[in-house]
Image (tube, grey):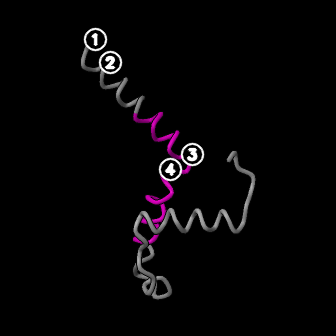
Amino acid sequence: MSGGVVGAVKRGARGVAWYLKAMLGEDAYEKYAAHHAARASDPSCAAHEVMTEREFWRDQTDRQDKNPQGRCC
C-alpha cells in the first residue's frame, strides 16, 4: 500500500470512530466542556465551575435515573 492509501484508511477509521462516539453519547463531556469554555465570559455562567469528567458522568447517570426515557438498558 502506498502512503496515500494508508492515510486515507486512517482518516476513514478516525471518522468512523468519531461517528460512533457521537451516536453513543461518548463525546458528551467534551461537548459540555467546550460549551462551558465558550460561555465562560457570560456572568450568569461564570459562577459555575466546570465539573470533572467523573462528576459529569455521575450527574448524567443521576439525571437519567430520575427522569427515565427510552434507552436500551
Q: Amino acid at mark 2?
A: Val
Give the CA separation, mark 2 to mark 3. Answer: 29 Å
- The residue singled out by tag 1 in the image is 1
Query: For residue 23: magenta?
Result: yes
Give the CA separation, mark 3 to mark 4. Answer: 5 Å
Position of residue 53 relative to residue 50, above or below, is above
Give the CA separation, mark 1 to mark 4. Answer: 33 Å
User: Which label belongs to residue 26?
Assistant: 4
Q: Secondary structure at mark 2?
A: helix
Position of residue 18 relative to residue 35, above or below, is above
- The residue singled out by tag 3 in the image is 24
Give the CA separation, mark 3 to mark 1. Answer: 33 Å
Is residue 67 toward the left or the right of residue 51 in the image?
Answer: right
Query: For residue 25: magenta?
Result: yes
Q: Which residues are magenta?
A: 14-37
The x and y percentages for residue 31 are 47, 60
Q: Amino acid at mark 4?
A: Glu
The x and y percentages for residue 63 are 63, 67
The x and y percentages for residue 60 are 57, 64
Q: Secondary structure at mark 4?
A: loop
Is residue 24 toward the left or the right of residue 16 in the image?
Answer: right
- The residue singled out by tag 2 in the image is 5
Position of residue 13 relative to residue 49, above or below, is above
Q: Amino acid at mark 3?
A: Leu
Q: Amino acid at mark 1?
A: Met
Q: Nearer the viewer, mark 1 or mark 4?
A: 4
Q: Secondary structure at mark 1?
A: loop
The quadrant the N terminus occupies is top left
What is the magenta segment's predominant secondary structure?
helix
